[in-house]
Image: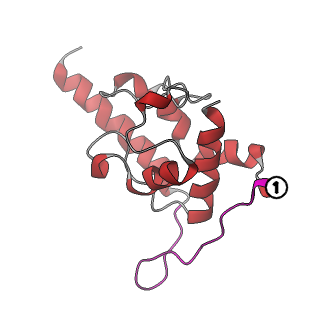
Amino acid sequence: MSTFKKISMFGLLLGLSLALGMVHCKKKPAGGKSTDKTAPKAADFDVAKAKKLYTTNGCQTCHGDTGMGDGAAGKSLNPKPRNFKDLKGYKQGTSENDVFKTLTDGVDGGKTGMVGYKHVPEADRRILAKYVVSLQK
């Protein structure tokens, strides 16, 4: 496959992934900051809801169904998407808070395939962070 076709395929897949995420966009209040500070409590963690968020926000597109970095779109990315089970590979830390920050800001300011998902409500990003940490095990 030519370099141009690879770049075009990457752009198409990244665009589709972002478009999927935008479907779940919520309008932010004036000032651009989210006022949603509701972090899920451990007892409130619903794995089924978390998995649905993981799918509907396009995470599995790159990271795969089980977080191994083997999603269909991820195959064309360089660097490859994070395998959540490989704790040495995380660039910004492995804790829930670290993963939440990555979900919010992306990696390297979005200069990699992992862009920020600030358009996803904060509570959902916190659930996703908890889910990603659960996939580490």
Name the dominant secondary structure of the magenta segment. Answer: loop
10 sits to left or right of 48: left
Q: Secondary structure at mark 1?
A: helix
| Percent of width and height locating residue 34 | 51, 74
User: Could you tell me the amino acid type at mark 1?
Assistant: Ala
In the rendered image, the residue lying farthest to the bottom is: 30
Q: Is residue 32 above or below residue 120?
A: below
**Magenta highlight on residue 1:** no
Q: Residue visible at 65% across and 64% down?
A: 39
Nearer-the-camera pick, 19 or 94: 94
Residue 55 visible, this angle: no
Q: Residue visible at 28% across and 47% down?
A: 108
Residue at the spot of label 1: 43
Q: Is residue 47 above or below residue 31?
A: above
Residue 53 visible, this angle: yes
Q: Which quadrant of the figure contains the C terminus?
A: top right
In the rendered image, the residue lying farthest to the top is: 1
Region of the chain picked out in magenta, as a range: 25-42
